[in-house]
Image (spheres, helix red, strand yellow):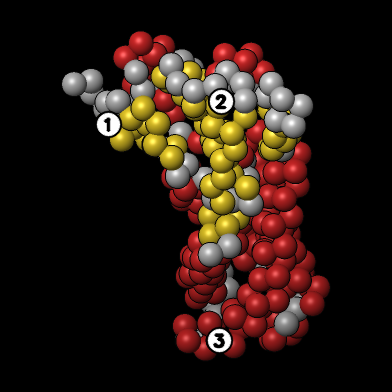
Amino acid sequence: MPLLKLTKSYRHHFLVALAIAIWLSVFLILIAPFDIAELPIKVRLELMPTYGLISFIGYILLIPFQNWAYKKMSVLSISFEVLFIILFNVFVLIGSYIYYKSSIVNGNYTFMKFTFEIYYPIFFILLPIIIFARWYISRKVTTQNSKKIILTGDNKLDILQIKSEDLICISSADNYVDVTYLKNDVLSKKLLRTTLKNIEFQLPQLIKVHRSHLINPIHFKEWKNANTLLLTQVEVPVSKNYKKDILAMIHSSLKMNDSPQSK
């Protein structure tokens, strides 16, 4: 199943929702499909922007749900994107019909006639814009935020260059370190001949959770138990020597209220 990386920024999704609302309002006012064309331009200017507002609210209401799912999974599948659009469609359809039947518009179509003769023809014109806007803003933000890191070992050929957000954890393996990371969203590993101490020096942003393990906190999922962290597709042990320091850190996902009670 193809995976997606999406921005969780409310500011960016606010811009997407605003673009959808403005486009829909302008389309209904100027293109005036169906019997909207029979309305004077002044009436269209009064009535049509509310449909844009309904689409704006419907989109924004779904962002907390999207961000919650993204926090749980780190990446989202195409099927989730389809689910998001379906839910958006349902919210906007219901909101639009309630407004259409209100005393303000006083429409006389039944729900079925409104849905299939008015709403869906317009929605399917709007759909490519929704998909493009979500893809574009996420791609732009992901590209801007993607910083490359270079890990080097003792040998000249021991080099690994990856995006910082793709690094999951690094574990000590005798005279080597085992680097666990995502490559095109697939779990991958590479051995480098170096020490965990050298890696700590190269990447101070990593958190030491065990004398043999460093983790990238952005991949933290949850505490499996009092001595184990669940990362993206990986489990890492936590030693007592580091547990207190981990819980005291400002990384909200690792704070005490997300951890199990010590046994």
Does dot 1 land on a helix, a strand or a loop? strand
Work out whether mark 2 precedes mark 3 in sequence or the reverse, and give the earlier one.
3
Q: Which residue is mark 3?
A: 116
Residue 63: which disc? none
Helix, strand, or loop for circle 3? helix
Q: Is residue 14 left or right of residue 110?
A: right
Kind of residue at badge 1: Asn
Q: Which residue is mark 1?
A: 225
Image: 238 above or below 73: above
Q: Nearer the viewer, residue 207 or 195?
A: 195
Q: Quadrant of residue 22?
A: bottom right
Residue occupied by mark 2: 176
In the rendered view, tell whether residue 146 sits above or below residue 204.
below
Q: What amino acid is labelled 3 in the image? A: Phe
Q: Is residue 148 visible?
A: yes
Instruction: Name the residue: 68% across, 24% down.
Output: 153
